[in-house]
Amino acid sequence: MPWSIPTFSEIKAFLGLTYQMGISCKLSTKLYLRYLYFSDHVKFNEPRQGEQNFDSLYQIKPVVNHLNNKFGLEYIPKRNVTIDKYMVPFKGRTLLKQYIPSKPHKWGVKVWMLDDSDNSYTQYIDVFPGRTVRTEGSLASSVVKNCIERANIAGQGYHVDTDNFFTSPTLYLDLWENYETATCGTVCTRRAGLPKNIMCKKPVNISVRGDLQFRQKGAL
């Protein structure tokens, strides 16, 4: 049987089967239909690693862009959305592979996702390209701003929740003033710009575990 280029319907069937495998788990992959051959490592006229304008995502980027377009067309998220990082388990050879000891799956491909906080529907996904791409400012700030811009939720009345990897007073103030987007999140005690008297191990005027204190600074 000669090699052939898969049709659009075959690609849709492959993606649908892969998505369904995450919902309906079987004891063995033999219980699923056979896979279509998705891609070989043909060397296109793309810059190679170490060359200028090299993009480690060039093979998968069309698929990711197509999914993001469909995410926005199929569903409008509710008011509260969450930006977080996830690890897709993978131990094969790829420049995208990351090692994070704190994660249940220590080896894999890191992705950033903007989800509906109520039902976890994914509105936008971005694959972390590794250290091959430089960003302006901190990585955390760049990720949050990129997700908000690409998901087209700036100035639309959405409320964004983040964890302590992303949370910072500088970022939150920037989002409020320039993106018209409210934010909330857990914080790291070592994060710059936070009041030190309540971010220490023994906060001032808190005697009972669970007590609350509030601080305000401008729009924060």
Image (tube, helix red, strand yellow):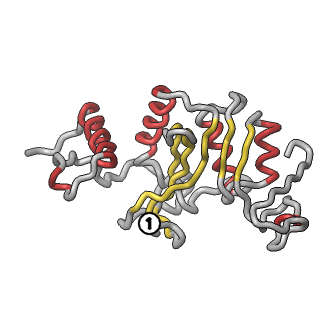
Q: In the figure, 193 relative to 125: above or below?
A: below
Between residue 27 and residue 173, name the one nearer to us: 27
Which picture quadrant has residue 133? bottom right
Q: How many marks?
A: 1
Q: Is residue 35 above or below residue 149?
A: below
How far from the left and from the top, in percent, is residue 94?
Answer: 41, 63
Amino acid, disc 1: His
Mark 1 secondary-structure assignment: loop
The front one of 6 and 114 is 114
Q: Is residue 142 left or right of residue 132?
A: right
Looking at the image, which residue is at 37% across and 67% down?
Answer: 91
Considering only vertical position in the picture, is 193 above or below 151?
A: below
Q: Residue furthest front?
A: 208
Q: Which residue corresponds to mark 1?
A: 105
| Quadrant in which the N terminus appears | top left
| Residue 202 image offset from top left, x and y in percent | 83, 73
**Residue in the picture at 43% in, 57% down:** 88
Residue at 78%, 68% (x, y): give it. Answer: 190
Number of other residues with Cα within 10 Å of mark 1, as a class: few under 14, some 14 to 19, many 20 or more? some
Q: Position of residue 87 (x, y in %)?
A: 48, 59
* Location of residue 32 with respect to 189 vertically, above or below: above
- Look at 82% across and 66% down and name the residue there: 199
Q: Position of residue 201 (x, y in %)?
A: 80, 73
Would residue 170 be found to the left or right of residue 29 on screen? right
Between 193 and 35, the one lying in front of the other is 193
Instruction: State the residue in front, 180 or 98.
Output: 180
Residue 121 as seen in the image, left or right of residue 193: left
